[in-house]
Image (tube, rainbow, N blue to C red):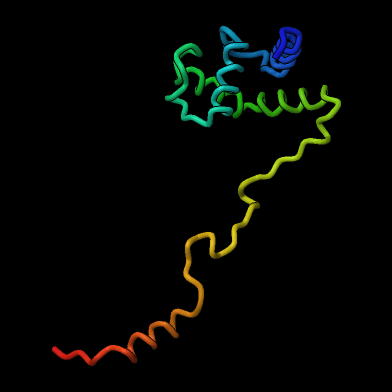
Amino acid sequence: MTEPDWEVVLEVFRAARSRWGDKGRDDRRFLEALHYFTVHNITWRALPAEFGCWNSVWKRFWRLSRSGVCEAFFQALAGLSRTSHLVQMFDSTVVRAHVSAAGAKGGSTARRLAALAAGSRPRST
């Protein structure tokens, strides 16, 4: 992102933030840490040290997301965008896979078991 883009993002983030409580030391580094976390699909513990202590970043994210700041931030950014109406997302909870994608074998198990029983010799103890 360019510097003017960062200025807009940071201004929107500061406006979405609560007026109460600790404000954090470096908003840009925090937002860059969140970006790195999502782009690289890593765990919080794998966050590079250049972003600070991973636990501090996680706690701040958790606190802000619970208070609704993250939602307000993304809503405000979407309101500034001229193309936000073109973006669509899929939630993984609504995406369904075919039964065979789970590795299940097709056909009736009753017929296979009957065929195995008919072809095996009797057992006695």
**Residue 94 in the image, given as x and y percentages of width and height:** 65, 52
Front-most of residues 87 and 13: 87
Q: Give the residue at x 33% y 88%.
A: 117
Residue that appears at 51% across and 13% down: 51
Which quadrant of the figure contains the C terminus?
A: bottom left
Residue beneath the point at 82% across and 25% down: 79
Where is residue 110 shown, x and y percent of the image?
Answer: 44, 83
**Residue farthest to the left?**
125
- Specify whether 60 is left or right of 48: right
Q: Residue 34, relative to residue 8: is it above or below?
A: below
Residue 57 vs residue 114: left or right? right
Q: Residue furthest front?
A: 119
Residue 76, image x and y in percent? 77, 23
User: In the picture provided, is 106 more to the left or to the right than 118?
Assistant: right
In terms of depth relative to the viewer, which is nearer, 20 or 42?
42
Residue 88's place in the image compared with 29, above or below, is: below
Percent coordinates x, y for residue 40 in the rendering = 54, 28
Residue drawn at x 70%, y 15% is: 1
Out of 97 and 45, give the one closest to the viewer.
97
Position of residue 28 relative to residue 43, above or below, is above
